[in-house]
Amino acid sequence: MAPILTLLVILTVSILITRVVTTALVLTGMSHEAARFQARSAFSGVGYTTREAESIVSHPVRRRIIMLAMLLGNIGIATVMATVIMSFISTAQAPERRWLNVLFLFIGLAVLWVAAASKRLERGLNRIITAGLHRWTRLDLQDYVAILQLENGYAVSEMKVEPEDWLAGKSLQEAALTTEGVLVLGIKKPSGSYLGAPRGAARIETDDVLILYAPIHRLEELDRRRAGPPGEMAHEEAVAENVGGEG
């Protein structure tokens, strides 16, 4: 009886671990279904080659979560196997208790199955796990690579403004970078101050560092753009290209 009870305890802990791993992955920005699949795959060690797996490998926080799940899974599976073997040995030594052990195991597995399938219990457990993770960890990190589509030709980049640059001395309203499809996320001043989500009146000065979000080719062209008529012409061409792309 003791080995079977140990087995049920181990299975219960395993279910809790996969729930914790699932919730932790959800806090990094993954969907619940994808997070649950990846958690179970990592814990069971069956391997996976889905697209979500690539997003885990490229995400440092998710990668640490999955590595821990793999480690705990290997320990848990080995313990389960040892417990099952012990259970069979004990029942072989005491045949009269074999059916009682089988019945106890069946009832225990049925209870675990019902508990694991209960949506109400899952919601309550998820609330507890989420509260605990928020209190004792820092996992509420979104996957900005996916959110900003940085793998699809977009990038967030810093650009230092040189004296001869087309942007030098212009306000954001005058530069009208949004018409080119370029967003200015922030401006780092030489003094060390930072202006986040700047408005149109903000002026771009020499030695400012701009935090820009745009297609990669546009960021590269903007960094090469110089003041004067060629720069104005390049701006008009970029606006036309952006309007054409939207259409």
Image: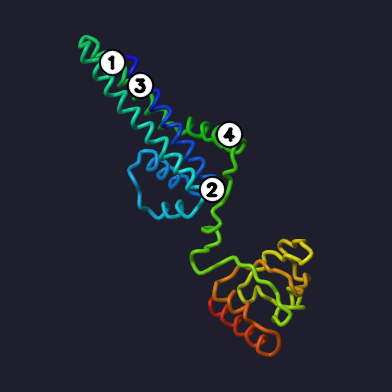
List the residue tagged with mark 1. Answer: 101
**Res 108 → quadrant:** top left
Quadrant holding the N terminus: top left
| Secondary-structure class at tag 3 | helix
* Between discs 1 and 4, the one toward the N terminus: 1
| Secondary-structure class at tag 4 | helix
Q: Is residue 209 left or right of residue 51?
A: right
Task: Specify the amino acid type for callout 1.
Answer: Asn
x, y percent for residue 240: 59, 83
x, y percent for residue 134: 60, 38
Question: Badges 1 and 2: C-beta atoms under 8 Å apart?
Answer: no
* Between discs 3 and 4, the one toward the N terminus: 3
x, y percent for residue 31: 48, 48
Task: Specify the amino acid type for callout 2.
Answer: Thr
* Between discs 4 and 2, the one toward the N terminus: 2
In 3D space, how far apart are the residues under numbered discs 4 and 2 (Cα atoms)? 15 Å
Q: Callout 1 environment at 10 Å: few (<14), some (14 to 19), or many (20+)?
A: many
